[in-house]
Image: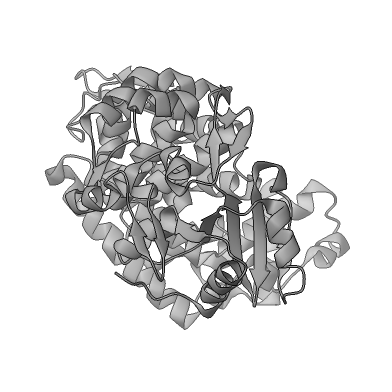
Amino acid sequence: MSFPLTKQVLWLFDQFQSNGYELYLVGGCIRDMLLVRPIHDYDFSTNATPDEMIYFLRDTPCKIIETGKKHGTLTILYQNESMEVTTYRLEQTYVGHRRPDHVIFTKNLIHDLSRRDFTINAMAYHPRYGLVDPFGGQKDLKDAIIRCVGDSEQRMEEDALRILRALRFSFELHFALEAQCEQAIKKKASLLTYISKERIRDEWNRMLLSDAKQLLRKLRNNGVLPYIIPQITMIESLTQENPWHIYDVFTHTDVALDHSEGMSLSEKLAIVFHDFGKAQCKSFDENHNAHFFHHAQISAEIAAAALQEMKYSNKLINRVVTLITFHDYALKPRVKLLRRFLAKLDTNYELAQSILRVQYADDCAKVSTYAAEKLANNSACQRLLEDMEKEDQMLKRSDLAVNGYDLIALGYQGKQIGECLDRLYQFIVDDPSLNQKHELLMKIDKMNDFRK
């Protein structure tokens, strides 16, 4: 068995071999090469210590970064390729269910592979000696199974992040969890309280982007969802007694997420949180139909707080909040209505299309007979927006034929200026041909008459 390797990787193998040391590619890159997936990082293991590596590489044209030296890891930069090399090691006791309290270097590759999380990540490769697979990782790849190396519960106890990694690999690769691995996840899920918000967020992001089906239900069934999104309890048993919905809010959200294939992270997060506010504003009419007035705004506020807790960037949070705020905004494929919609978004066509994609997923999770017209409108709006953008029909507020100085000259002051410009902008949004200075001044005169 052989794999195509870059010239930088082959160069590194030559350096170690010529100096009498072992070097093997290990971990995820082997898994991805066997699956014929893109390789993002090259990780190596060796029987050389960090000091030995530094010594025999000292006169070569590479740069050595020693950031991880105390744990046996050096990053070697050669011809714009970054390669991590770690000394074979054993890990004894772990601190905080996350990291080993200390590492012990070893000269045995198999010992090094035995400390790894899953069999599919516990293989090594050398271009001359081939594949080293002591735990059956290649077979598990063929059988599409996520299996722990050794005792599953011990692996999760050592590093609780493996609980989420197992699920994430299952979603990304469309693999099943081996029975003991799945049982260990359910039994040890509470250990996720030891994992930082940032680490949980990063695994959660990759789960969302995997496009796995029934994602929320699978996470709930494995007992980990409350440790990712504590606020999920708001909607888990929230029913929707009206003609538009067939599911409770939790299932509706998961089904909507099933229809988000290929969408961005911000869109998927918006879909997850878009109905959380329904728990706070449920009411019934005289026909016993449930209504959730103003739930979009409340959901946006809940999402903002939750995403801040998970350490998302302000830019992404603001984007998600906007998507949720407009997820139930009524739209029809009419130029005038779409102009007004765009005006609320500062003429951001891309954001408008993003909102429509979120609305599409939301409507796909409703009773089909009621949602059919909305889905048809959604598709028509997307097409019309594309045409409008090509024709550059939309004016921005900065395109107004009058400005603040004109209003100051007319006696406007302070907040009056902004309010007047907003009203003038809405005036020309409906009919851009009215964006003439004399037309706008006449409009201002009428506004003044009305105020009098």
Q: Is residue 56 above or below residue 6?
A: above
Q: Is residue 403 visible in the rendered structure shown here?
A: yes
Which residue is at a point 70% across and 56% down the rendered structure image?
Answer: 52
Q: Could you tell me which quadrant the N terminus lies in?
A: bottom left
Compare residues 24 and 428 and report the one nearer the observer: 24
* Residue 287 as seen in the image, left or right of residue 428: left
Q: Is residue 418 above or below residue 382?
A: above
Q: Is residue 304 visible in the rendered structure shown here?
A: no
Counting the numbered discs, the total is: 0
The residue sitting at the bottom extreme is 391
Position of residue 333 measured from the top left corner of the image (x, y, whole percent): 32, 63
Compare residues 304 and 13 and report the one nearer the observer: 13
Q: Quadrant of residue 96?
A: top right
Q: Quadrant of residue 181?
A: top left
Instruction: Indicate how the structure is coloured in the image.
Output: one colour
The residue sitting at the left extreme is 369
* Residue 279 as seen in the image, left or right of residue 317: left
Which residue is at a point 69% across and 47% down the rendered structure image?
Answer: 68
Position of residue 290 measured from the top left corner of the image (x, y, whole percent): 27, 23
Q: Quadrant of residue 124?
A: bottom left
Position of residue 276 measured from the top left corner of the image (x, y, whole percent): 41, 29
Q: Is residue 179 above or below residue 105?
A: above
Compare residues 401 and 232 and report the one nearer the observer: 232
* Residue 222 as seen in the image, left or right of residue 226: left
Which residue is at a point 39% across and 73% down the rendered structure image?
Answer: 386
Position of residue 433 measured from the top left corner of the image (x, y, whole percent): 55, 78
